[in-house]
Amino acid sequence: MSRLNYPLNCNTGVGNTGLPSCTINLERLTGLLLTFDGFSIDASSLTDFDTMFAYLQTATLNADPLMRIYPLNIIEGLTDNTAAPEKKMSGYGNTKGVTEHLHQFEVELESHGIHFYKNLRKWNGRKNVRAYWVDKGFIGGYKDSNGDLQPMELDIFFKQVKPGNVADITKYMCEVELKDEKALTDNLDGMAIPNGFKVKNEIFGLTDVELSGTGGVLSATVTGVLSISKEDFVRKFYGELFANGPWVVDGVSKNPDSIINWNVLFTLTAGTHKIKLASPIILAENGIGSNTSGGYESNEITVTVRAN
């Protein structure tokens, strides 16, 4: 009689079941640190929480929008809409395998007004979005082969506003789908948050500054307001904006000649000129925002200066 000789494989990859004395639990989503494909936290910055978090804070001011962190720390609730795992059965009724599905969540956000929500809806349709999962007790992603902490791949869609009525408040909702069904289990890695530390109080996104300007005779006058609140930006940072560094004219740093009644005056040659604020990190170095309180970013305006 012939025999089939299969090699015996005792390496079944099981996990040991000794109970740990310290655990990180998946408890409650409190925020997402949005970013884009290509961003990661270097392994050298994962030595401890303070070093890792400082890396994230600094990234909120990155001059490159695709290498920036955009904190979304306004989550008030979550509904798990992930489909239940499906069992694959043999003809004899035995389980042959289990298929898990992508995580799908409906997330309720704090209300910060319709203009803020318009900014969030600009994320809709982006296919290169990534995010770090901020839970009650940890910040999570996954480790790559270099030991860097990568953000999770996801789709995020900020839905139409759900107006309130007598009984209910107006709700701002978004849908989140993690593109790895093991993102919150097998592939999850990250760093525990120290007791008492509130992520939402320590990391902030950029605030848009809306510049306006007019050209004059060999000069240009510029004003600026915060785009949502309309607070006068020049009044808020008068001293800092009159120093070296905060302004860029035609791609080069340039100091204003004066600031009068919160109007910033530049002496320029005749012709067309482009004016904007310096990058968020340069502004922070000049005392305008910071990596712990949030920074600022402006539009670029074009002014036409006359010779006479």
Image (cartoon, rainbow, N blue to C red):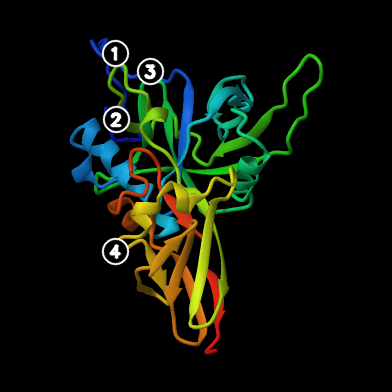
Q: Is residue 239 left or right of residue 45?
A: right
Say which label, 1 or 3, has the lower sequence index. 1
Left or right for 167, reference 12? right
Horizontal placement of 152 versus 189: left or right? Answer: right
- Which quadrant holds residue 99? top right
Residue 306 place in picture, x, y as percent? 55, 86
Contact flag, marks 2 and 4 (Cβ < 8 Å) = no
- Mark on residue 308? none
Q: Mark 3: which secondary structure? A: loop
The residue where tag 2 is placed is 191
Residue in the image at 37% along x and 57% along y: 241
Q: Residue at x 58, y 36 (%)?
A: 176
What label does residue 17 carry, if any? 1
Please state which of the two labelled residues, at mark 2 or mark 1, is closer to the viewer.
2
Please tell me whether mark 1 or mark 4 is closer to you in this view.
Answer: 4
Q: Earlier in the sequence, mark 2 or mark 3?
A: 3
Residue 45, position in %: x, y?
A: 22, 42
Circle on res. 244: 4
Give the amino acid type for the residue marked by disc 1 in the picture.
Thr
